[in-house]
Every structure is written in C-alpha cells, then in structure tokens.
Amino acid sequence: MREVLVLRYPGETRVAAVEDHRIVDLGLFRDDELRRGAILKGRVTGKTADGRGLFLDLGHGRSGFLQVHGEDAPSEGTALLVQVSREAHSGKAAEVTTAPALQGRFLVYTPTRPGMAVSKSIADKAERRLLFALIEGQEMPGEGIVVRTAAVGASAEALTGELTRLRQTWKKAQSSADPGSDPAQEFLIGTEAAIRFNDRAEFAKAKTLYPDLAERMSLEDGVITEADVDALLDSLATAEVPLLGGGRLLVESTAALTAIDIDSGPATPVNANRAAVEEIARQVRLRNLAGQILVDPIPSGGKGGARVFLEALRHVFADDPTPTTVHGLTHLGLVEITRERRAAPLAELRLQPCRAALNPASVALDALRAALTQARATKSAALTLTAAPPVCDALRGPLAAALKDTETALGGKLALKKDQALTVEVYRLDPVKP
C-alpha cells in the first residue's frame, strides 16, 4: 500500500487505499449508519422462539440481534452495553456482542475477557517472546490484551501508550455509549503508506488517535484526487468492467449470490482469463461483495488451464484483509468463492433496490459535496439546491446533520427547492440572486 486517502464530507467519510497510482480498496462510511466496532447501549425487546437470540432496540430506529449462550438470557427491557460485530445489511439487523474488542494499531483490548496473547502470525518465536515480555504485567483484573502483527518493532512506549488510549476509549463508551468510531481505522492499522486528508479537523483527530503515524500524515494532494474517487464510484454502479486487451467482466449480484462472468471480446481466452484475475479480486474488494461468489472463466487449456486460473485467484485473494476462501470448481466449471460479510455491499449504500441508479440519500450527499465545490470555485456562499422531493426529504430528515455541516462550511443557508419534474438522480445548484 503506497497511499491512503481520507476524504471527509458532510454526512459521510470515504477512504481509498492506493497502490501504484490505482485505487485497490475503498470504504464508504455514512454518519447515520452503525459501523462495525461501534459501542452503544441497547435494550432487549424480545427473543427468538428457542431463546438463543435476543432482539435489541439500539435507538434512532435501529435494531440489533444478540446471540446468547447458556440459560441466563436477559429479560425484556434489560439495558445492555454492546458492540456491533456485523453491520446491518439487506434489511437484516446489525449483529452485536456483549464481549467487546477494541482494535488498536498494535493491540486488541478486551475489557471483559481476560488473557494475554501474541498474534500467531508472527513467525519469529524470539520476537513473540519479546512482545509478550513488553506487555506482561500491564493487564488489569478481568481484561485481556492481544498483540497484533503490526506491533513487530514497536517500542514499549508505543504499546503502553496505545493500551492507555484503548482503556480511555472503553471508559468513555461505558459512560456515554458513543457509537462513533474512526471510519479510517481498518485502512490505517498496519499500513506503511502516506496518509492524506482533505479535512483539517479529520487530520487533527487522526494525529491524536494514531500518534505513531503522524509523520506520514498530511493535508497535501497525492497521486489520487477526490475527482478520481468520484469517477471510481460512478464506475462501480455499472455491471460492466473493462479489461486490458479488450475483454470485460460482468458483475451481477442477487440476494443469493454474486455472479462474475468473463467475456474475452477481441482477446484470446487465455489472455482474457489472465487479465481478469487481479481485476476480479479488486472489484470484489471495491464493491465489498460477500457471501457466495461464482466466477465463470472462459474454457481454455482443459483441466490444466482451469487449475492455473484457480491457483491465480487463490494467490490474489490471499492479500484480502477480509477472510476469503477460493474453494474450487463446480461440475459446470464455475469457481466457487466465499467471503465473510462484514458490512453492507457498496451497491446497497449507493443504489436504489433493483436499479442501477443512485438512491436519494446518495444523491443528497453528492449534492452537498457539489455545493461546497461550487462555492469554493465561485466564491458564492448563498446557493439553492433544486432536487426531486425524495432528495430534499432526505436532507430535511435523516441527513439533516449533514445539511447543517454543509451550511456551516458555506457560511450561509443552503435553500432546498423541490421539483416534481426531476428524477432522483438529477439536481441543480443555483446562486441566490441578491
């Protein structure tokens, strides 16, 4: 990883990981969505028929599901402090746990599960013994500490400092149950990349959260711009992905699975399959595809060619931070892949159901970003946003905080005007005449 771009806008944060001048991973985090790792208070509202699952009210119309073990299940109305272990998606409630794990760059802190451990991914036994010695004796009764792979080479001061910050985070969560968490965390932990920000407040917050990374953080422009991220998001709304050599991928998702078809076009089957391998892994990560994935390669080279394609896929998916397994070939020659579901797929966040068109919330947030860009270019703070009624309703409802942030940045009010004649995807920004 060469660069991480953290883009903060009203209502959402975008994080892009860049290698060799190309975006290879992308995170889109909405302020009104509960993210994996968030800690908050919930109240039990019911249970499953077998009593092994609890339904929770997490506030603000959000619901959660808690798997319980044993017979001492909390009764209805009980308040619980929980952590989101899997984000809500496809109409399913967020999954939560009462055994939180706070992720740091070097450590994982488990305030309710005692024990000390060092990541088994650290192959050097001497290094593992050294790291264990650095944290040994620092645990308090009832808490646990796991040293992560990224801690190799870290100083005792760095480990101690992070442990202190994680304890403070837990203490704050217990008192306020603040669901906020750092969207960029999963991209920054373990990275050796340059980290660039477009927002001064986000830049300052990151330096406080990750002091060991501060020297690689800046507000300067990098090799990938905000416009590049916008263009990529637009391309991810389509099923067709061009390949080097003239071939293409067709990516289609259903409720049950995602199908990826390789079309050779003018390229030879061998070259099309070869060009498709890395792009398949990239598209899966960018689109945050999960669950069952089927890949239909072009038949070429018999069983030997199929084995080469299969091993190539296993190689590229080995670098995926989300657990992914390339199982093998079906009787029909399709490659079976399963990928752990940790968050909603990008299409669910950005697009309307069953349509390759942006949903009202996505259009509303795009319009707010466009208003800030236009205001900077024209030196005009007074603007009117004309949009379809669902877009205006989103800005007056769930995205009201994002609208307020935009108006603060503009230094003036952003007037909203409904136009029944406009489709959801179309909006206008006009300066207010004096």
Image (spheres, rainbow, N blue to C red):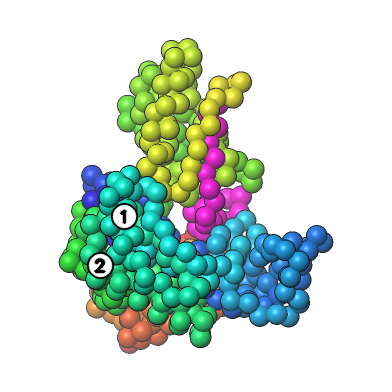
SS at badge 2: helix
Residue 115's disc number: none
Tell me the crowding category of disc 1: few under 14, some 14 to 19, or many 20 or more residues within 10 angstroms, Cα based: few
Q: Which residues are magenta?
A: 334-356
Q: Is residue 45 left or right of residue 260?
A: right
SS at badge 1: helix
Q: Is residue 355 magenta?
A: yes
Task: Report whether residue 17 is seen.
Answer: no
Marks 1 and 2: which is nearer the front?
A: 1
What residue is rendered at 39% in x and 53% in y? 119
Q: Along the polypeptide, which appears first: circle 1 or circle 2?
A: 1
Q: Which residue is mark 2?
A: 156
Between the residue at mark 1 and the residue at mark 2, the CA separation in whole angstroms equals 13 Å
Which sits in the foreground, 95 or 360?
A: 95
Which sits in the foreground, 153 or 290?
A: 153
- Residue furthest to the top in view is 302
Q: Which residue is mark 1?
A: 129
Residue 3, given in percent of the width and then of the height, sits at: 25, 55
